[in-house]
């Protein structure tokens, strides 16, 4: 038998086996998956279950991916600053960039639109999320606040319910442990505006556009309804 015939037969057999495998796998997924979960979601869950960096906390997946762009310990944990990423790419991309050695910006957690959390630091670590800032009568908010980044741009689309629920899940034990008052849960824009008002001579403190007042109020309302604040 000619060589090209063997090659053609081999390719055909491989193609048939591959198609059959995909078909059988799709049947298996569709029969075994919980109601309301797509095959893609189930596959993602299976992948994450096999990766030790991932675990389920309540309803949402969490990946601990600690950054070196911080100061270990020293955070007094007196407040929470809410941000939106307003960045291209995925939430995972944002987390990866913040973990890149030498990067000048970091936060404690990035929350994706499906509620997935990328935890980059312990609450007691000082991350670099606030910059020029003033909260209450104190400057340098990095030293005493938790930085939360919601993936997306609230000027273009609101936070998802999953993002807010995941934020509450993350914040509840922190707020309770450190007794953070409601007035110390703020947005980046709020603490930047307060700084600019207090130090108008600093031309490096550019105006900061961040989470909209409407979305900020949604988060506060959800925290109150969950009896967190």
Image (cartoon, rainbow, N blue to C red):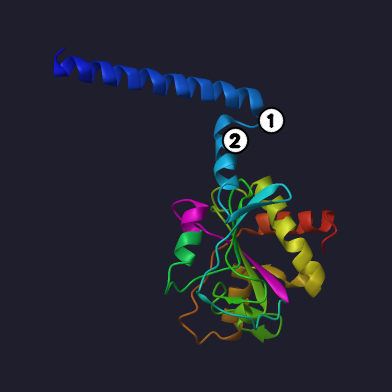
- Against 4, is 194 above or below? below
What residue is at 47 percent from the left and 60 percent from the top? 96
Q: Please tell me which of labels 2 and 1 falls first in the chain.
A: 1
The range drawn in magenta is 78-94
Q: Which residue is tagged 2?
A: 42
Q: Residue 34 — which label?
A: 1
- 10 with respect to 36 (left or right): left
- Residue 67 sits inside the magenta stretch: no
Crowd around label 1: few <14 · some 14–19 · many ≥20 (10 Å): few
What residue is at 55 percent from the left and 67 percent from the top? 66
Q: Nearer the viewer, residue 66 or 19?
A: 19
Q: Is residue 217 visible?
A: no
| Percent of width and height locating residue 94 | 48, 59
Q: Is residue 227 visible?
A: yes
Q: Residue furthest top?
A: 1
Q: Nearer the viewer, residue 22 or 86?
A: 22
| Percent of width and height locating residue 75 | 66, 80
Helix, strand or loop at disc 2?
helix
Q: Residue furthest front?
A: 1
Crowd around label 2: few <14 · some 14–19 · many ≥20 (10 Å): some
The quarter of the image holding the C terminus is bottom right
Instruction: Please report contact status of discs 2 and 1: CB closer than 8 Å, yes or no.
Output: yes
What residue is at 57 percent from the left and 62 percent from the top? 210
Q: Residue 128 — which label?
A: none
Q: How many dots with numbers?
A: 2
């Amino acid at each position: 038998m000619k060589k090209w015939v063997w090659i053609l037969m081999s390719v055909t057999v491989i193609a048939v086996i591959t198609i059959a495998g995909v078909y059988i796998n799709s049947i298996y997924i569709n029969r075994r998956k919980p109601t309301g979960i797509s095959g893609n979601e189930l596959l993602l869950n299976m992948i994450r279950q096999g990766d030790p960096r991932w675990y389920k906390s309540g309803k949402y997946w969490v990946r601990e991916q600690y950054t070196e762009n911080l100061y270990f310990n020293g955070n007094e944990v007196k407040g929470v600053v809410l941000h939106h990423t307003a960045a291209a790419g995925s939430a995972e991309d944002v987390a990866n960039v913040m973990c890149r050695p030498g990067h000048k910006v970091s936060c404690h957690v990035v929350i994706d639109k499906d509620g997935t959390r990328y935890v980059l630091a312990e609450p007691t670590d000082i991350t670099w999320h606030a910059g020029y800032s003033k909260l209450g009568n104190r400057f340098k908010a990095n030293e005493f606040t938790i930085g939360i980044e919601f993936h997306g741009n609230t000027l273009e689309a609101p936070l998802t319910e999953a993002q807010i629920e995941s934020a509450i899940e993350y914040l509840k034990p922190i707020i309770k442990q450190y007794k953070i008052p409601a007035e110390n849960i703020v947005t980046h824009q709020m603490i930047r505006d307060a700084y600019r008002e207090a130090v108008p001579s600093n031309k490096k403190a550019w105006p900061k556009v961040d989470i909209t007042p409407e979305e900020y109020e949604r988060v506060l309302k959800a925290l109150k309804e969950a009896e967190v604040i």
